[in-house]
Every structure is written in C-alpha cells, then in structure tokens.
Image (spheres, rainbow, N blue to C red):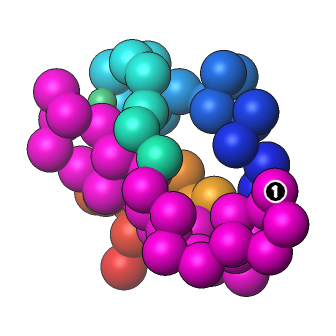
C-alpha cells in the first residue's frame, strides 16, 4: 500500500486515524508493516502490500 492511503484509512472500531509502521518497503509502497490505532491499542497487519483492517473480534 502507498503511505498516502493513510489519509483515507480509518480504524474500523473507533474510526480514528491510524499510525503506519513500515517493516518492509519497495519504492514508495509499504509491503509489510502494521497500522496501529493508539486509542484502541490494536495493530492491523499489512501483508504483501494489503492492509488487513478486520476488527480484532472478527479475526479467527
Ligand atoms: Zn480504533
């Protein structure tokens, strides 16, 4: 995902803004990392460039 996406991505639980932590990047794309919601204390993973914004209680 591109870091610009952060401007439109919101936490699915509280609809707050997310903080991006990139672990692996290719050019401007974040391949692996996490999106963190500070108020919820939840990390949403980014895998293969795709942010997984499922609420924690909907994960298996
Ligand atoms: Zn939240």
Quadrant in the rendering for residue 24: bottom right
Q: Residue at x 81, y 56 (%)?
A: 28
Q: Residue at x 43, y 33 (%)?
A: 18
Going by the image, does 26 lie left or right of 40? right
SS class of the residue under badge 1? Answer: loop
Q: Position of residue 17 (x, y in %)?
A: 43, 22
- Residue 13's place in the image compared with 27, above or below, is above
Picture residue at 33% right of the left edge, 46% below the top:
36
Vertical placement of 25 versus 1: above or below?
below
Q: Residue furthest front?
A: 27
Left or right, residue 22 beside residue 3: left
State the image quarter where residue 13 is shown.
Answer: top left
Q: Residue furthest right?
A: 27
Q: Is residue 38 above or below residue 7?
A: below
The residue singled out by tag 1 in the image is 28
Q: Position of residue 59 (x, y in %)?
A: 39, 69
Q: Is residue 55 magenta?
A: no
Q: Residues within 10 Å of mark 1 (few under 14, many from 20)?
A: few
- Decide whether the magenta segment is chiefly helix, strand or loop: strand
Q: Nearer the viewer, residue 34 or 25?
A: 25
Q: Foreground residue, 34 or 15? A: 34
Magenta range is: 21-49
């Amino acid at each position: 995902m591109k870091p610009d996406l952060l401007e439109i991505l919101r936490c699915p639980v509280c609809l707050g803004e997310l903080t991006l932590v990139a672990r692996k990047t290719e050019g401007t794309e974040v391949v692996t990392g996490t999106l963190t919601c500070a108020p919820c204390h939840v990390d949403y993973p980014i895998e293969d460039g795709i942010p997984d914004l499922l609420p924690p209680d909907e994960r298996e």
